Amino acid sequence: MKRDAITYTDIQPMADEVSGLIKARFGGARRGEQPPLAVMLRRRGGALPRKLRNAAARLAEAERLSAQPKVARQLRLDGLDRAHTELVAYLRPLGEISRWRGRAVSFAASVCFGLLVLGAVIVWIMVQRGHI
């Protein structure tokens, strides 16, 4: 979905959307917290490819400047819509259900591995004591 940044008021929702997608895909925020894009880039920006990290930095800078209306009217908005489109296209392919399923499988694998190690320790202790 391509969003055209027509005015400086469109920058904030675009940055919030990218920040939410980074939070959903890479984590880095507490439950219920919606940090600005600059904070999410500082926390989890290293997980993005360099080209997208630069695009996200441009969008975060525009978000910071758009808070001041006089300065925001002077912003060049031509590349921000493309940066937003690239970031959303990269961050959105894995749906929320797929991420939850991946986390559940990872958790189940951890539990199974722990039970396997525990069983091996119990068998080893029983062999050492002569029960088996």
Image (cartoon, grey):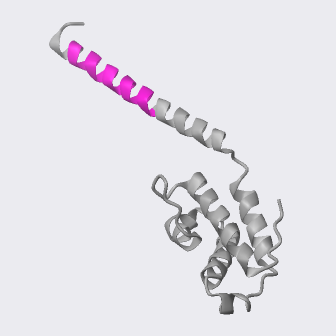
Q: Is residue 118 magenta?
A: yes
Q: Position of residue 126 (x, y in %)?
A: 22, 13
In the picture shown, does residue 115 fall above or below 15?
above
Looking at the image, the residue that sits furthest to the left is 129
Residue lying at 68% horizontally and 57% vertically, measured from the top left:
91
Q: Residue at x 18, y 9 (%)?
A: 130
In the image, the segment drawn in magenta is 110-126
Counting from the top left corner in percent of width and height, residue 113 is at: 42, 29
The quadrant where residue 114 appears: top left
In the displayed structure, 70 sits above or below 83; it is: below
Q: Is residue 129 magenta?
A: no
Quarter holding the N terminus?
A: bottom right
Residue 54: percent from left, percent from top: 66, 76
**What is the quadrant of residue 59 in the picture?**
bottom right
Q: Residue at x 60, y 53 (%)?
A: 25
Pick the front one: 122 or 64: 64
- Which residue is pictured at 48% across the width and 30% down the height? 108
Horizontal placement of 81 versus 91: left or right? right
Magenta span: predominant SS is helix
